[in-house]
Image (cartoon, rainbow, N blue to C red):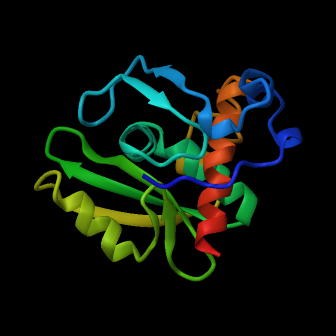
């Protein structure tokens, strides 16, 4: 588990109000997904900025696209769209990370080479994988608005933003 310095309260008014004077990382938010993660998990306890097993499952295997969008928006970079192939469905998105200007990617698992991301994904199944760089949110995920924020409630935007900022801080 990685614990980070709490962000400025003014950056996250909804989370700050919920924390009621305590550091944001002490909050415990129950997150439930309609569509489970890759590993079948649909209920998570997330603490803002704390990278633990639930955060890795949520932002690595279910909601990675939003985290990548938040990182890309802040850094001004593109997205690494990783797709897997199946005979039934053809090429389908399987993971999204931010493709940083230094040539590495940044996702919930940290700042690392694309080869490492692909190697990690290959441990999950025998699918052929490919990746491509896309420069805008609509290119990465057509039909999901113009920004990663478009389909999310404000509290979710704040929560994802905390993780994005902490990961960027750690990659610097």
Q: Position of residue 158 (x, y in %)?
A: 71, 36
Which one is in front, 162 or 116? 162
The number of discs equals 0
Which quarter of the image is occupied by the C terminus? Answer: bottom right
Q: Position of residue 71 (x, y in %)?
A: 64, 56
Q: Position of residue 73 (x, y in %)?
A: 72, 55
Residue appearing at x 22%, y 52% in the figure:
85
Q: Residue at x 14, y 45 (%)?
A: 87
18, 137: nearer the viewer: 18
Above or below for 15 versus 11: above
Does residue 9 lie above or below 166 as drawn? above
Q: Quadrant of residue 143?
A: top right
Residue 137 visible somewhere in the drawing: no
- Most extreme residue toward the front, as rendered? 22
- Apparent side of residue 121 relative to residue 144 in the rendered image (left or right): left
Q: Residue at x 73, y 32 (%)?
A: 22
Q: Residue at x 73, y 22 (%)?
A: 18
Residue 81 at least partly seen: yes
Residue 67 shown left or right of residue 151 in the figure: left
Image height of 139 relative to 29, above or below: below
For residue 6, above or below residue 107: above
Residue 148's image quarter? top right
* Quarter of the image where one finds residue 144: top right
Q: Nearer the viewer, residue 161 or 104?
A: 161
Looking at the picture, how far across and down is residue 40, in whole percent? 25, 28
């Amino acid at each position: 588990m990685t614990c980070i310095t709490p962000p400025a309260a003014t950056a996250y008014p909804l989370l700050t109000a919920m924390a009621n004077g305590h550091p944001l990382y002490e909050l415990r938010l129950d997150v439930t997904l309609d569509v489970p993660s890759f590993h079948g998990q649909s209920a998570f306890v997330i603490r803002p900025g704390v990278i633990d097993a639930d955060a890795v499952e949520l932002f690595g295997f279910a909601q990675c696209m939003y985290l990548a969008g938040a990182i890309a928006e802040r850094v001004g970079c593109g997205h690494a769209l990783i797709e897997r192939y199946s005979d039934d469905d053809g090429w389908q998105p399987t993971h999204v990370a931010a493709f940083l200007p230094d040539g590495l990617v940044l996702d919930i698992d940290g700042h690392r080479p694309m080869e490492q991301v692909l190697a990690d994904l290959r441990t999950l199944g025998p699918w052929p994988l490919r990746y491509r760089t896309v420069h805008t949110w609509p290119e990465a995920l057509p039909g999901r608005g113009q920004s990663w924020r478009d389909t999310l409630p404000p509290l979710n935007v704040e929560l994802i933003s905390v993780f994005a900022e902490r990961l960027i801080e750690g990659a610097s």
